[in-house]
Amino acid sequence: MKLSRTRRALLTLANVAVIAFLLLPLLPVVMGALQSEKALQSDLRSLLPRQPTLANFELILTGGAHRGPIFDQVTYLPKSVERFPAAFMNSVAVATSVALLTLLFASFSAYTVARLRLAWVKALLSLSVASRLVPLIVLMVPLYVLFRRYGLLNSLSGVVIAEIGFLLPYAVLILVPYFAALPAELEDAARIDGCTRFGAFVRIVLPLATPGLAACATIMFILSWHELLIPLIVVSRPEVMTVPVVLAGLVSDYFVFFTLMMAICLLGLLPTLALVLILQKYIVRGLVAGALKG
Amino acid sequence: MRREPTAGVLAVLLNLPSGLCLLLILAWPVLYAGWLSIHEVSLRQLRTGELPFAGLANYARLFADEIFWLTLRNTVVFVGVSVALEVVIALAVALVIDDDRVGLSRVTRVLLLVPWGVPPVVNGLLWAFIFNTQYGYLNRALLVLGLVHEPVNWLGHPQLAMGAVITAYVWRTTPFNILLYHAGLRGIPRDFYEAAEVDGASGWRKLWHITLPLLRPIIAVSLILRTTFGFMVFDEIFAITQGGPGNATWTASWYTYRAAFQPPFNVGLGAASAWVMALILAAAGIAYARMVGRRLEG
């Protein structure tokens, strides 16, 4: 059926509104990041940066070493500035480890749920669904006490362990529908040819489920990159802080410049925003699968 | 044929890693939190390693705390308003982007996940900037448009601050609902609509009698997920208001965080409040597990 002209115009307009809803709140971040605090404060009605500058980014990316004319006179810089470069690397390490390890463990479990028809494995799935709804803060109180006892506070491995525990059930939920959707005949054929069940899993199921594995790993990476509460509680020494913790430090820093804060925010959100835009197709399917089918 | 483990043995082996993880990092800590909640635990006890039994003292203290009840009320308001907004906005957007014949809807779909990709703590900071009285972009925009003559102190007023936190949170979380509803709309056979059109049904009637009833299972799942996640909100509270002004935006996670991890570091009290929160959410969790479990078996 053809779309009437008014209907098309209305829907297009509605789409413009939706795009505005999705993107407008990010504009202040960009606008703020591209100007000096002085410029921001000089005119309280201007929306665009008066004199666009990249000074904020230069300062942050060099960990406060490259000050330039704008920060020349500034005696106090927020600690988050000098901590950012190291925190960025920590976040890369943590998110990558979390993504790969959860993917590995979850793919084993998801395979048993999808393929081996056993009652207790099914019960395990229900348990995963339920444990996805355990409030993180409930977990953090005892984990803090336990980590303290076993010397895992202030270590990146402590952060990774806690995040794996929290995210693993979700990873299983995302993967199960992908495995379940693969035709069982391929595995059967491989087994007739002398492949073991595990061999068929590694050689047939895993390669075929690549889109699912990619979706799962990406979602896990993003959720780990976003995680604030776990590293906030596990970590207090600057050298093991992750990006969200460094960003959280801006809240209690009394001398924070908004422009500098927005520049750090922009750098902190770029990696996952890029992933979301580039791998959008996989992520969308993974999120839908994890919520509705798994 | 080569010898290989039976399905049962293989299942045990393959589930060993995640089983251990779940047991050690999820199940045990949750139970241990219950144990902590009936003991006296603060920094001094943690240092000595001796945790004296306290019976229900932590719970008694919790229920006697006015701020705890205020926190529960705030949480209910936060969850109620944000879930309602998430569902209504997501439904509207899902319907807007559903029509492939509108070229722009393809662009919208690509951008859909942008807010979801923003780290929650960044989301909090960015909205803190937007709502800032002096330099914030909301007041700038309102002043430029002439809608206000004086900058509004958004975060200084209890109700406005709650509204600000909810706005920030809903912006980040609504896209997830949009995805679910969009997937749901795609699952509705076109014939249903064509049959209704033959019978002369209007757009609203189609929405009311075909779309919404068929989306109901998905909406139910999203309601449970959004309710529990709303309950757990932390980052936006932390970054935008820190629970303020006064205690106006204290919500469940913030209460536990403040009790256990800020002076005077009363971990026992934090564990008690966390357990009360977990019990409230357990009901929702069981309902969700049943619903999804049935889907998978069906």
Image (spheres, coloured by chain):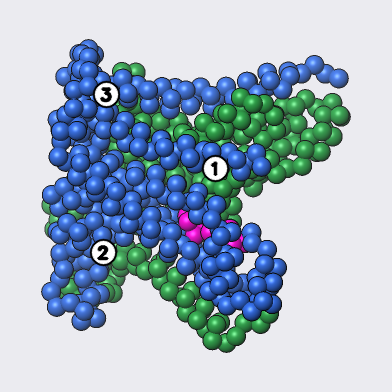
Region of the chain picked out in magenta, as a range = B176-186
* Disc number for residue B130: 2
Graded by Cα atoms within 10 Å as few (under 14), some (14 to 19) or many (20 or more), the crowding at tag 1 reads some
Which mark lies nearer to you, 1 or 3?
1
* Disc number for residue B291: 1
Q: Is residue B10 above or below residue A236?
A: above
Q: Are marks 1 and 3 in contact (CB under 8 Å)?
A: no
- In x, y percent, where is residue B85? 38, 60
Disc 1 chain ID? B
Where does the N terminus of chain A fall, quadrant-wise? Answer: bottom right
Residue nearest the viewer, comparing B198 with A191: B198
Judged left or right of residue A244, residue B161 is left
* Residue B106 seen in render: no
Using the numbered discs, state the Cα–Cα distance from disc 1 to disc 3 in whole angstroms. 31 Å
* Disc number for residue A32: none
Residue nearest the viewer, comparing A89 with B244: B244
Q: Is residue B104 above or below residue A85?
A: below
Chain that the image shows in green: A
